[in-house]
Image: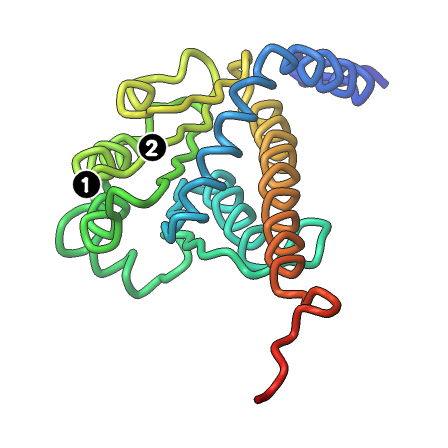
Amino acid sequence: MPDADPERQSEEAQLDEHIALAAALKPLIPDVARVGDRISRALEEGGRVYTFGNGGSAADAQHLAAELIGRFRRERRSLPAVALSADPSVVTAIANDYGYEDVFARQIEAFATHADVVVGWSTSGNSENVVRGLRAAREAGATTVLFAGGDGGPARAHADLVLVVPSTKTARIQEMHLLLLHLISERIDAWAASTARASMDRELPVEGSAQRGE
């Protein structure tokens, strides 16, 4: 029976689109490395990661925070990260008193410093609360990172580091954002584990070096 929806894509076509778009991300690998290294450096220097988005992008923000606080693949110390969409009392209070456009900026004003990295997620780059959140982070002196699609939208102007998926289809962009998130998590995870090993090596006593009592 023919499908009555002319916009419907077959599962095979969607999968082919996904695979082709994943291959198209290869030019972003240097930017992935820069984002991972910048976050690692901030964490090493005592900074935190603050992250936010709307809808599926809020889920990506919470996913990133979970990978940092928990772990990705290795046993290592917990890394400080906060998803600013996760507290409904704060979000609804700000939305009610100031407007939904300020739900992230207001929190960034409270928390972010020059030592931190602030990560915004928006498939279009047009979400006003993400734009304002990144702008507030810049004003606080934090490093700003944007995950987006299309041309990055107006949010791009407020980001120091940008990962833009070359697509305008929300579903495909979100799928690629998850892949990029995992690539960055792997890089940060490896850094955190290696610093833990280096610290342990420094703390191990060298045979014969113990001081003798007088």
Residue 34 on image: x %, y %: 49, 25
Residue 164 on image: x %, y %: 48, 18
Where, quadrant-wise, is the C terminus in this rendering?
bottom right
Tell me the element at label 1.
Answer: loop
Q: Residues within 10 Å of mark 2 (few under 14, many from 20)?
A: many
Farthest-out residue, bottom: 214
Tell me the element at label 2.
Answer: strand
Image quarter for residue 184?
Answer: top right
Residue 176 on image: x %, y %: 62, 26
Decide which of 106, 170 is in the foreground and name it. Answer: 106
Image quarter for residue 70?
Answer: bottom right
Where, quadrant-wise, is the N terminus in this rendering?
top right
> What is the CA distance from the residue labelled 2 to the residue labelled 1?
10 Å
- Kindly identify which residue carries mark 2: 144
Residue 36 on image: x %, y %: 53, 34
Decide which of 35, 22 is in the foreground and name it. Answer: 35
Give me the disc on residue 140: 1
Residue type, label 1: Ala
Farthest-out residue, left: 97
Residue ID at (13%, 56%): 97
Residue 18 lies, with reference to residue 135, above or below; the image says above
